[in-house]
């Protein structure tokens, strides 16, 4: 049973930084993309950042230049370094990993970690 455990959320003042981590364990095989999403109160979940198995990255326009996604393939962990945080970054952040086994594809989500940015 694959589990994703997130950590690193918390309360920070505007302009501050946080680093989120998401460690995958249990039945891990071929991890493809590793992603971060977020959901603010009253809003739909939105894409934040993605990193492919070979390290290519892509970001939502709202976080470009401030957030950096990275991964450790030995530890099966994805990170999100968040700098210059703004109150509008306040949300629950979710990690998501996609794996494949032959032609079968699998999609897993973390439980979410709260990030609150005060003005």
Image (cartoon, helix red, strand yellow):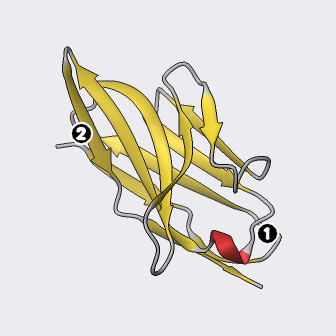
What is the secondary structure assignment of the residue under circle 2?
loop
Image-quadrant location for residue 98: top left
Q: Is residue 62 above or below residue 75?
A: below
Residue 26 tag number: 2
User: Which residue is at the front of the view, 45 or 36?
Assistant: 45
Q: Is residue 83 above or below residue 61?
A: below
Residue at far bottom of view: 119
Image point (54%, 39%), residue name: 50
- Looking at the image, residue 14 sits to the left or right of residue 42; the answer is right
The quarter of the picture where the N terminus appears is top left
Residue 19: image x %, image y %? 64, 56
Residue at far top of view: 102
Image-quadrant location for residue 82: bottom right
Q: How far apart are the two marked residues, 2 and 1, measured between alpha carbons? A: 34 Å
Image point (47%, 73%), residue name: 43
Sequence-wise, the earlier of marks 2 and 1 is 1
User: Which residue is at the front of the view, 81 or 23?
Assistant: 81
User: Which residue is at the front of the view, 47 or 83?
Assistant: 47
Crowdedness near tag 1: few (<14), some (14–19) or many (≥20) residues, C-alpha within 10 Å: some
Residue indicated by mark 1: 16
What is the secondary structure assignment of the residue under circle 1?
loop
């Amino acid at each position: 049973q694959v589990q994703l455990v997130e950590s690193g959320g918390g309360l920070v003042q505007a302009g501050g930084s946080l680093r989120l981590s998401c460690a995958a364990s249990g039945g891990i095989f071929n991890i493809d993309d590793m992603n971060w999403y977020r959901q603010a109160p009253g809003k739909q979940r939105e894409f934040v950042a993605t990193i492919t198995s070979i390290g290519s990255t892509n970001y939502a326009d709202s976080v470009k230049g401030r957030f950096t996604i990275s991964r450790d393939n030995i530890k099966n962990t994805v990170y999100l370094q968040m700098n210059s945080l703004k109150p509008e970054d306040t949300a629950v952040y979710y990690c998501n990993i996609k794996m494949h086994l032959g032609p079968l594809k699998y999609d897993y989500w973390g439980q979410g970690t709260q990030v609150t940015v005060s003005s």
